[in-house]
């Protein structure tokens, strides 16, 4: 018997490869930005500057970075998330 949860999981299944946006929120710091980009490129080497956008918080203490990658699979996304969260300056990865 299929439950609503099973039905929703089937409905929202991601088909790889696909374009996948990642949002990283962390401290505003030039070193932090370059570390984040280095980690992203380790997992998605094709990322270009056109696929990266940043925005500072109102008080300038934090910045959000959006990076559009071509995701190749769930294992790539999990590894990327783990490596980004391991950076001291990163507070959140969405």
Image: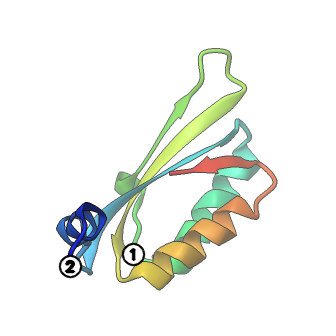
Among the 4 quarters of the image, the one containing residue 29: top right
Q: Colour scheme in the image?
A: rainbow
| 66 shown above or below 37 | above
As drawn, is 49 to the left or to the right of 2?
right
Q: Label 2: how many residues lie within 10 Å, few (<14), some (14-19) or many (20+)?
A: few
Residue 67 position in % (x across, y down)? 43, 55
Q: Residue at x 63, y 47 (%)?
A: 92
As drawn, is 48 to the left or to the right of 34?
left
Residue 53 position in % (x across, y down)? 43, 44
As drawn, is 49 to the left or to the right of 93?
left
**Residue at the extreme top:** 59
Q: In front here: 74 or 40? A: 74
Helix, strand or loop at label 2? It is loop
Q: Which residue is mark 1?
A: 46
Helix, strand or loop at label 1? It is loop
Q: In front here: 17 or 53? A: 17
As drawn, is 58 to the left or to the right of 69?
right
Q: Where's the N terminus, which quadrant?
A: bottom left
Q: Which residue is mark 2?
A: 1
Residue 10 position in % (x across, y down)? 21, 72
Q: Residue at x 55, y 68 (%)?
A: 40
Residue 36 position in % (x across, y down)? 63, 59
Q: Residue at x 39, y 75 (%)?
A: 46
Q: Earlier in the sequence, mark 1 or mark 2?
A: 2
């Amino acid at each position: 018997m299929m439950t609503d949860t099973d039905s929703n999981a089937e409905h929202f299944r991601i088909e790889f490869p696909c374009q996948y946006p990642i949002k990283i929120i962390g401290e505003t710091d030039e070193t932090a930005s370059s570390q984040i980009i280095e980690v992203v490129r380790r997992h998605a080497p094709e990322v270009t500057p056109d696929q990266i956008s940043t925005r500072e918080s109102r008080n300038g203490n934090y910045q959000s970075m959006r990076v559009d990658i071509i995701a190749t699979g769930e294992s790539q996304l999990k590894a990327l998330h783990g490596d980004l969260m391991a950076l001291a300056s990163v507070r959140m990865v969405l």
